[in-house]
Image: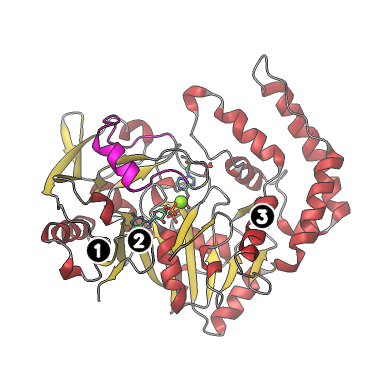
Amino acid sequence: MHSTCVVGLQWGDEAKGKIVDILGANHDIVVRYNGGNNAGHTIVHGDKTFKVSILPTGILKPHLQAVIGNGVVIYPPQLLKEIEQLKESGISVTNRLLISDHAHVIFPYHIIEDKLTETEKSGAIGTTGRGIGPCYQDKAGRVHGIRVGELLYPQHLKARLAKIIAYKNAIFQTFTPEGATPQQLHLEAVYDEYRKYGEAIKPYVTDSVQYLHQSLQDKKRLLFEAAQGSLLDLDHGTFPYVTSSSSLPSGIWPGTGVPAKMLGKIIGVLKAYTTRVGNGPFPTELDDGPTGIGERIRQKGREFGTVTGRPRRCGWFDAVACRYTAAIAGADELAVMLLDVLSGLEEIKICVGYELDGAVRRSFISDAHILENCKPKYEVMEGWKEEITHVKKLNDLPAQAQRYIQRISELVGLPVKTISVGPDRDQTIIID
Ligand code: GDP
Ligand code: IMO
Ligand code: MG
């Protein structure tokens, strides 16, 4: 079995894109199975920087076929924009990109619904505002979900949109806050726009399940790239502050039709610290002001969202959370990213337990309303002064950095096989 999954073990942005980019060299097909353009990956090749959110990161490697599986939700204008941007950078997707006819489509009403829900200040999830949740809601609700394949049948599409838009407009009338004007969509305009998207993406649309099964028979090596992180997984993350899809490897089976038993290796990607965008509990958050360590990490790690530009919340590494996600993900090994960001700190803390109701817990609690009362119990480690962005071998890292990596490995219970010390693919330490 030569297939690999790259999965984030925190709240997203673990630098999965960099690992996918590196692993692409040893695979034939890269597959996205969850999420949509809420994801945002930045990949650095020397002086060139690429950003993708709906296209699989692996599309940057010209020898790879790229598949957007049925578990993904697609906002066509963003997809077409990214295809265009890649072309301008000299990367063609022609004959390389396949889109599942069963992936669901994000419409303008999903984006309006996302924003309407998020205006309820007390309950806001802090979503990316891309209509992801409402689109998955319509998929699970069945009545209003539209799949990519349906864009290719104009009459059928129009008939479906007529009913859906009437329903959504009624909702907007009812739930728009007082004083604001309810948005109203026009069937002809939406239909016309999406019919054209259908024509534009038609060359890429296919039965991806059949394609992937044939590829497995042909002994092709598949690389599955998860979007988001395991703590944002709909079932196992910090509900309700999660995304609306399965970001764990468990999403691969429903999201592509490829059975889990076909996976050879699962690589859990984590930052040497923790970040989170959006709302929800974050026990190790460093909310210590403009001169604090949280802000220092944010500036040094350039921790601002790829999709929304929001400042990411920053904090210490949480070994309790990562042991939990590594177990559910079935991770075989770890990639520890952005280690360079911690250089120059006198001491570094690792969360090894939670204090709750006067007792110390060593296991994670994913219920947001309980997790928010957990206080982290820290182990303190000595930091290192040297910059490490040039280091190529484990033994050349400062002894304190080596001990820190060793401790992460012990606490999470998995070997660390990759260490990243800078955004470029060359700034990577591979441990045999
Ligand atoms: P993803 O969503 O998991 O693919 O991660 P993002 O691309 O959203 O965020 C990771 C960011 O960290 C990107 O801007 C990367 O270029 C950058 N990055 C990756 N590895 C390293 C590293 O080892 N050190 C530093 N300083 N930056 C890194
Ligand atoms: P990548 O793939 C970090 C977060 C949002 C919000 C929650 C729900 O780059 O790691 P949604 O728009 O999905 O309904 O928002 O999930 N979120 C991410 N955070 N990285 C991501 O993707 C994310 N995708 C969604 O900030 O808290
Ligand atoms: Mg990201």
**Dot 3 amino acid type:** Lys
What predominant SS class does the magenta segment belong to?
Answer: loop
Q: Residue at x 40, y 57 (%)?
A: 15
Q: Is residue 318 visible?
A: yes
Q: Give whichever of 329, 306 is nearer the camera.
A: 306
Q: Give whichever of 24, 7 is nearer the camera.
A: 24
Q: State the residue position of label 2.
A: 268
Q: Secondary structure at mark 1?
A: loop
Q: State the residue position of label 3.
A: 81
Q: State the residue position of label 1.
A: 414
Q: Residue at x 42, y 38 (%)?
A: 311
Q: Are marks 3 and 1 in contact (CB under 8 Å)?
A: no
Q: Identify the residue at the far front of this view.
A: 47
Q: Secondary structure at mark 3?
A: helix
- What x and y, as percent, mark residue 410? 17, 59
Quarter of the image for residue 256 reads bottom right
Q: Which residues are magenta?
A: 279-305
Q: Are marks 1 and 2 in contact (CB under 8 Å)?
A: yes
Q: How is the image coloured?
A: secondary structure
